[in-house]
Image (cartoon, grey):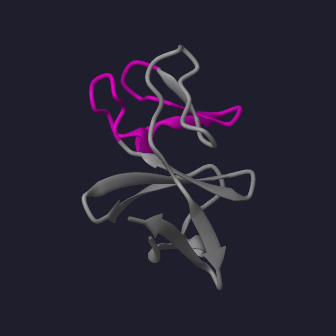
Amino acid sequence: MSWREIAIASDIEEGQAVVCKDKNETIALFKYQGNFYAIQDRCPHRGASLAEGEIENGCVICPWHAWQFELKSGQSIEGYAPLKTFQIKVEKNKVWIKSD
């Protein structure tokens, strides 16, 4: 595994998300309470972009049907299948993702 740069940290405002690509993965990168979280961008229900969802209490809310997923763990609040999460780090204003 190696680390790949996926974003510039200062380009992402608090409470916002951006869509990033890493190889064949589409990733939603969120900044919440000063920390960065990376999860798969597509909701497993109908494929909505989770980067377009609202963040509330550490969870992203799907913009289409309001399914909720924890940013840190990818776990579904409603008990559905969890989202894939990605290990990230921030160094010198760059956001890096651990890649296969």
**Quarter of the figure with the C terminus:** bottom left
Residue at the location (34% across, 39% down)?
42
How many labels, in total? 0
Q: Is residue 58 above or below residue 11?
A: above
Viewer-side residue, 38 vs 32: 38
**Quarter of the figure with the N terminus:** bottom left
Q: Quadrant of the rendered structure where residue 93 is?
A: bottom right
Q: Which residues are magenta?
A: 42-66
Q: Quadrant of the rendered structure where residue 2 is?
A: bottom left
Q: Quadrant of the rendered structure where residue 59 is?
A: top right
Viewer-side residue, 77 vs 54: 77
Q: Residue furthest bottom?
A: 92
In this rendering, position of residue 20 left or right of residue 76: left
Residue 64 within the segment the image draws in magenta: yes
Viewer-side residue, 86 vs 7: 86
In this rendering, position of residue 13 left or right of residue 96: right
Viewer-side residue, 63 vs 27: 27
Residue at the location (39% across, 53% down)?
27
Residue 5 within the segment the image draws in magenta: no
Give x and y (percent) for residue 88.
Answer: 57, 63
Residue at the location (42% across, 39% down)?
50
Residue at the location (34% across, 28% down)?
44
Give x and y (percent) for residue 33.
Answer: 75, 51
Q: Residue furthest front?
A: 1
Q: Residue furthest top?
A: 78
Q: Is residue 94 above or below residue 48?
A: below
**For the stretch drawn in magenta, what is the main secondary structure?**
loop
In this rendering, position of residue 37 left or right of residue 82: right
